[in-house]
Amino acid sequence: MAKIKLEPYMWDEEHEAMPRDKLRQLQSERLVATVRRVYERVPFYRRKFDEAGVKPDDIRSVDDLPKLPFTTKDDLRENYPFGLFAVPLDQVVRVHASSGTTGKPTVVGYTRNDIELWADMIARVMAMVGVRPGIVVQNAYGYGLFTGGLGFHYGAERVGALVVPVSGGNTKRQLMLMQDFGSGVILCTPSYALFMAEAAEEEGLDLHELPVAAGIFGAEPWTHQMRQEIEERWGIQAYDTYGLSEVIGPGVSHECHAKNGLHIFEDHFIPEVIDPETGEPLPEGELGELVFTCVTKEALPLIRYRTRDRTRLFYEKCDCGRTLVRMEKVTGRTDDMIIVRGVNVFPSQIESVLLQFEGIEPHYQIVVDRGADQIDELEVWVEIPEEIRSQEGQVVELERKLAYEINSTLGIRVNLKLVPPKTIPRFEGKAKRVIDKRQLQG
């Protein structure tokens, strides 16, 4: 079968190619309205604004953004589950959640209008790739509280695509459906795309002979080298996509065919890049922490949300014709969080488990690597005292209990290694809890 022909286009040219001065005016109008609304409806923001000495009348344009206080993931956790919602629960039609640092998830809510907005943002993503009515889109992102599956599902339907909601896993079935249904676009994590390529080789299936012509890959860090490998093994165009559940899910930014940064849908999500240490805004092109203000969401309109992702912004018009700002591929984080197979993992989650076990000190290290099949692997090293190590039966039982508790807390399977005391390096300053070998490999 020949590859599906995909011709990229703009879903909402009025806003995607809006002159910068008009876009800025629109952002300002929406910001002013949002700030007033959260001040009136969300006690948390009223208190934060009052503590910062800022009133809604002080905000007249996007130039006034730096006057506003930041919102952090800790704020969402401390107001769990619905404390930051700006509408009553009878107007919330759905919640999603991502893993948090203490076992409690970060909860986000959506009104009917928020769901419509989300579908439109993903429709923009689909148009950037060239998805139109009649094209089969195979969605191998996970469905459930994770935003990936349902987020992409609604947006692909919005442009009229035929959506295959296969979700993740069951790789042989994925490959069978791809052949039988003539899938033109695949949606999944980049590591799973490489895993499917391995499985296809084992099955004697040449992915180059399938109609699939493009893939939309996100939910975990991936390098330019991984993009090249995916494109070569699949014979497709591989597009990077970015989102986070707190802002809306996928659909915050996406690559156009120029692949020169990810266009942020800044008519809805106003981006800033700040110095992570001082909180001061940085000029265009400087590397710092990405911050978003949501100016059209109803249920959870976050103000200056610190993503902890490191990137830089570029405002010049793109070759694709869009005037929307572009963000560089995320180069890392300003905190200890890591993303493994689409799941947020914090070292503090490991620590909270270890502190539950008498006699175990919180000396541990997390090692993330990509296996031979290109799937992320998470290994946790934990020191145990000699008096426990000398009792073989006790070690086996401890390993079983620890592995169960860590797997349950993280929501992801780990390889647990119990090691002798002093095995893990000690540091005079901040302990180096995470060794991410994925970044070392480029």
Image (cartoon, rainbow, N blue to C red):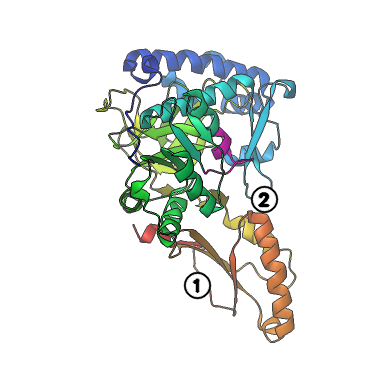
Q: Quadrant of residue 347?
A: bottom right
The residue that mark 2 highlights is 102
Within the magenta stretch, is there residue 325?
A: no
Residue segment shown in magenta: 140-151
Considering every residue shown, the one lying at the far left of the view is 319
Q: Is residue 210 visible?
A: yes
Residue type, label 2: Thr
| Of residues 320 and 253, the one drawn nearer to the viewer in this rendering | 320
Who comes first in sequence, dot 2 or dot 1?
A: 2
Mark 2 vs mark 1, CA separation in Å: 25 Å
Secondary structure type for disc 1: loop
Give coordinates of residue 132: x percent, y percent.
Answer: 41, 26
| Of residues 415 and 215, the one drawn nearer to the viewer in this rendering | 215
Name the front one of labels 2 and 1. Answer: 2
Q: Quadrant of residue 53?
A: top right
Considering every residue shown, the one lying at the far bottom of the view is 390
Give coordinates of residue 98: x percent, y percent.
Answer: 61, 43
Left or right of 228, for residue 100: right
Residue type, label 1: Pro
- Which residue appears at 52% of the width and 54% of the height? 172
- Which residue appears at 43% of the width and 14% of the height? 26
Looking at the rendered image, the quarter that the N terminus falls into is top left
Is the residue marked by circle 1 packed among few (<14), some (14-19), or many (20+) residues within 10 Å? Answer: few
Q: How many marks?
A: 2
Within the magenta stretch, is there residue 149?
A: yes
- Examine the rendered structure and indicate whether residue 432 appears above or below residue 223: below
- Examine the rendered structure and indicate whether residue 57 appears above or below residue 284: above
- Which residue appears at 24% of the width and 28% of the height? 319
Give coordinates of residue 184: x percent, y percent.
Answer: 41, 37
Q: Is residue 430 visible?
A: no
The residue that mark 1 highlights is 425
Give coordinates of residue 379: x percent, y percent.
Answer: 54, 66
